Amino acid sequence: MFVTMLQVAAGGAIGASGRYLSGVALIRFLGSNFPYGTMFVNVIGSFLMGFFAIYLLERMDGSFTRYAPFLMTGLLGGFTTFSAYSLDALYLIERGRYMAATLYMGGSVLVALLGLFIGMSLARTLA
């Protein structure tokens, strides 16, 4: 149990750092008028979750399940964020940017689900 906790903690630290760096990069390139960073990490994280769920957990011989706490709970859990998504959506609403808020909330969910589907499909194709 202790080793698993260390895996989750290490993955979380790496994932959260990746989320931070992604956000900084996207603000520099695209500006801060829309929460591109949060949307990006949630979509990419969903794609990777779908890929790992199929390729590593279902398609391999099961030996990769020991990496699931690090990769899926830690790394991807630290990389993606529902709380930041909620905060960004509320800020858009508070600023009266209702269309942007609607596009962000609906688009994030739809594109994240699409990313999950594509990741799973790719893993099934490769395996």
Image: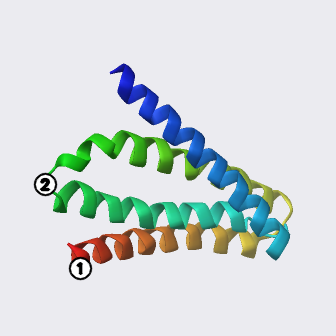
Q: Position of residue 42 (x, y in %)?
A: 55, 61
Amino acid at dot 2: Asp
Q: Position of residue 114 (x, y in %)?
A: 43, 75
Res. 67 image quadrant: top left
Numbered circle sitting on residue 125: 1
Q: Is residue 97 left or right of residue 16?
A: right
Res. 73 image quadrant: top left
Q: Position of residue 116 (x, y in %)?
A: 39, 68
Q: Position of residue 113 (x, y in %)?
A: 43, 69
Q: CA distance from mark 1 to mark 2?
A: 16 Å
Figure check: 121 above or below 56: below
Residue drawn 74% across the image and 64% down it: 35
Read off the residue under disc 2: 61
Residue 121 visible to an observer of this rendering: yes
Q: Is residue 84 left or right of residue 69?
A: right
Q: Residue furthest top?
A: 2
Which one is in front, 69 or 108? 69
Figure check: 33 above or below 11: below
Amino acid at dot 1: Thr
Quadrant of image for the N terminus: top left
Q: Could you classify mark 2 by the number of other residues whose Cα lies within 10 Å: few (under 14), some (14-19), or many (20 or more)? A: few
Q: Could you classify mark 1 by the number of other residues whose Cα lies within 10 Å: few (under 14), some (14-19), or many (20 or more)? A: few
